[in-house]
Image (cartoon, rainbow, N blue to C red):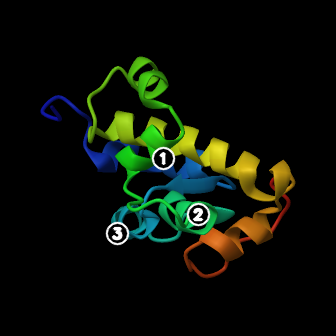
Amino acid sequence: MVEDAPRFADIERSVAERLRHAVFVAHNARIDWKLLTRYIPNPEVLAVLDTMRLSRKLSPGLTRHRLPDLVRHYGLDEAVKVLSGAAEHHALHDAVGAALAFVRMAEEFRSGKATLSELKRICGIETGGVIQESLF
């Protein structure tokens, strides 16, 4: 699948610029963040938020908090398929699923009036030196 993809070194600058002053959201974010920072040592993000940690806080009654479980819980299966055009566990499918689930959970969290500081406290991972600003 990646045979014709550009080398990361060729897109590193573009990726770093897109991340600049963004909120990085991922499911089990520690894994993605660790991999990303291997190639971009100090991305200038506002925060790194983990949808799995947020799910555990908002929906403690769920037996599992894997991304597919979260997507099903919020009834997002079809939307993720249509928007990503990819199968479960492919990067685009998982990115779209995490993004849509995050939006649903952020809407639930304090009735949509969350600050980035509050979300970072609940579901952020430590990255050192991230900026705290309002998200909503």
Q: CA distance from mark 3 to mark 1?
A: 13 Å
User: Which of these two is toward me, 56 or 94?
Assistant: 56
Q: Which residue is mark 2?
A: 54
Kind of residue at badge 1: Val
Label total for image:
3
Q: Is residue 48 visible?
A: yes
Q: Are marks 1 and 2 in contact (CB under 8 Å)?
A: no
- 127 over 123 or under it: above or below: below
Q: Secondary structure at mark 2?
A: helix
The answer to whether any part of residue 44 appears in the image is no
Dot 1 falls on a residue whose secondary structure is helix
- In this figure, which residue is indicated by the disc labeled 3? 38
Q: Quick one: which residue is furthest to the front in this view?
A: 61
Residue 41 position, x and y percent, is 45, 70
Residue matched to label 1? 15
Which residue lies at the image location 52% right of the left edge and 63% below the top edge? Answer: 61
Crowd band around label 1 with a 10 angstrom C-alpha radius: few (<14), some (14–19), many (20+): some
Which element carries disc 3, helix, strand or loop?
helix
Query: Disc 2 versus disc 3: distance between alpha carbons?
Result: 25 Å
Residue 48: percent from left, percent from top: 58, 65
Q: Amino acid at mark 3?
A: Arg
Q: Residues within 10 Å of mark 2 (few under 14, many from 20)?
A: many
